[in-house]
Amino acid sequence: MKPTTLKEIAKKLGLSIPTVSKALKDYPDVSAKTKKLVLNAAEELKYRPNSFAVNLRTKESKTIGLIVPEIVHYFFSNAIKGIVNQAEKKGYLVIILQSNESFELEKKQIELLLNKNVDGVLISLANSTADYSHLSKILEYDIPLVMFDKIAKLVNCSKVIIDDRKAAYKATQHLIDIGCKKIAHFRGPLLPQNSIDRFLGYKKALEDNNIIYDSSLVFTCDEMTFDQGKNFAKKICKEQIDLDAIFISSDLVAIGAVTEFKIQGVLIPEQISIVGFSNWFMSSAITPSLSTIDQPGYEMGKIAFKRLYKELNLKKENKEITPKIIELETELVVRDSTK
Amino acid sequence: MKPTTLKEIAKKLGLSIPTVSKALKDYPDVSAKTKKLVLNAAEELKYRPNSFAVNLRTKESKTIGLIVPEIVHYFFSNAIKGIVNQAEKKGYLVIILQSNESFELEKKQIELLLNKNVDGVLISLANSTADYSHLSKILEYDIPLVMFDKIAKLVNCSKVIIDDRKAAYKATQHLIDIGCKKIAHFRGPLLPQNSIDRFLGYKKALEDNNIIYDSSLVFTCDEMTFDQGKNFAKKICKEQIDLDAIFISSDLVAIGAVTEFKIQGVLIPEQISIVGFSNWFMSSAITPSLSTIDQPGYEMGKIAFKRLYKELNLKKENKEITPKIIELETELVVRDSTK
DNA sequence: CTGAAAGCGCTTACAG
DNA sequence: CTGAAAGCGCTTACAG
């Protein structure tokens, strides 16, 4: 079945194409009678505007691009969900791309989105992204850009983030409050701002409580996996590293650690208290349930889109866009691993 | 910065628009000298074809639509990943939508995709989808459609599936082989083909082994959640239901059950052997590790796109599309919960 | 080898 | 109230 065009409706009714177009768009200068005729014919012929033509005329596609480092992550798939749902509500469709934590891929994908003429871009950066010219390029083309969670401070666009430093501080302070003195930290990779900030928050909490920072208690994960958690836990047991608590930058890693500690017979929280990060749904399910920082993925996605939507509209009205940093509150969720 | 058009390049070089267009597309009837000139100018002016105009001319957008019931599911996010990666390789972009297991939303979203003039559609159905006219509509517009995992047998399009019945049979047979005699089943909701087939495979295995099917041993989950698993396990303990094995249609539900059984002091696999379904990454992580059926999500997504790609090309060549059912092999992964 | 012409399907400013 | 005209930016068949 071929799609119907305005031309066909016009021909059928003996009207001109502009009149049909205007009738369908309910322009005030078309007679009610004509409108009715056109509407009926459109219905009958199952008219559907050719979006390619509309895009070309209006210079917008009502489509945005989204790049995340990894789709298969509870946090990101939740963020995607928030973005997609919100976008749909506002009449926007979302093209999704995954950088796979690769800087090179991320650059290529931004090219793809620019070639596609998306109206705006939402991005959470790859861990390996160290240069930001590909992002500046988006801005140069006057395409609204909003970064969320994994951001680059140096890029002058709106950002939706949590205060990682504060959240990490809160987590560490909690461990101190329940009496822990030798607090280790499993941190994320070196480059991403999040891991840096979480590490700094951890360190600051120690300092503020007069606990001497000991770099030998900081373990750096190159990948945030279950096995990393297991392995570090194994190492701690094997080398009998003396500690009574760990603040771990990711629930998945934390659950790996908890699993290994259980196997090794280490009691949680009696011997080691643990706080994770993200409030992955499994953290409430495991035994002992995991204390953690709730990182609102769905909410972040939703708000990132909302901000982008605002900028999209500002642009349409030729108003200036002033980048905005939106910081969402995080909450410490206390569970059995710190009781 | 305004995007450069062919017109601008033509003007700059004193050439016509068609010549510039052909030079950029490396047509053989343009002189090498002109090509060089044009290529240089295009580079310098950062020319990028206006995709809206290209779409309108070529009548294709190199974009496909994807609808899944739920983005935040390990299986689906993996399938999405497979689709997006494969599509990118073939020069296609993917618009993603989530039906939220709602039939109504699914219908609306198909309208959105048709309005968008996507080149093809990939879909995994909502549990509540009971009527298929919205899917037939896609086919009526000659838009290639491929369903994966959650399919409707009645729709005449290509499908990528696993043999759920066979997989369930395999899982149940394994429980029988290790000596279990009173085998329960936690099944999924009533409507989806998958839950039906898995149930039938379970039943068939019992029959083939002369074990009498007992409907009181079948527990129906309305949602496949951790808590459902916990709750059914709790019920089994409380009512002291006599069984020595359970085949559970989802790893998440199975892990919920395992967690509850551990709390209740039921030994796995000594008292109850358990086989899950999907091979979620956590199933190898928990203790005891969970035997399960490996359901290749990434692979299914990849192959679904490949099939769609094939149909997209057949359509371009005006060749007829013969729907194809592609069945992927599943494997039983034996772990500690059945040893 | 180059370019004038037509057209993809729509929208909108303008004339009548 | 209706329609002829122009144009969005490109591609392609055709003339020269």
Image (cartoon, coloured by chain):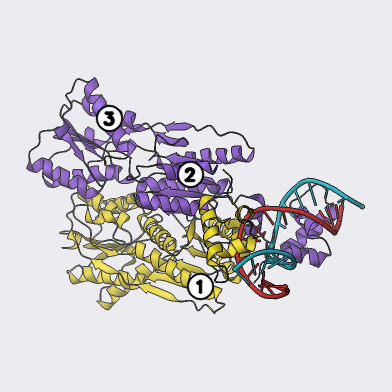
Chain colours: A purple, B yellow, C cyan, D red
The answer to the question of whether label 2 and label 3 lie on touching residues, with beta carbons closer than 8 A, is no
Query: Relative to B137, does residue A154 appear above or below in the rendering?
Result: above
Which quadrant holds the C terminus of chain B? Answer: bottom left
Q: As drawn, which residue projects farthest toward the left?
A: A239
Query: Which is nearer the eye, A154 or B160?
Result: A154
Same chain, labels 3 and 1? no
Q: CA distance from mark 1 to mark 2?
A: 34 Å
* Image quadrant in which you'd find residue A175: top left
Residue visible at 15% across and 43% down? A233
Q: Is residue A254 left or right of residue A106?
A: left
List the residue tagged with mark 3: A200
Q: CA distance from mark 3 to mark 1?
A: 53 Å
Amino acid marked by disc 2: Lys
Residue A137 - label: 2
Give residue A204's position: percent from left, percent from top: 26, 25
Q: Is residue B103 left or right of residue A283?
A: right
Q: Nearer the viewer, mark 2 or mark 3?
A: 2
The answer to the question of whether label 3 and label 1 lie on touching residues, with beta carbons closer than 8 A, is no
Amino acid marked by disc 1: Asn
Residue B313 - label: 1
Q: As drawn, which residue projects farthest toward the front?
A: B33
Residue visible at 56% across and 38% down? A311
Q: Residues within 10 Å of mark 2 (few under 14, many from 20)?
A: some
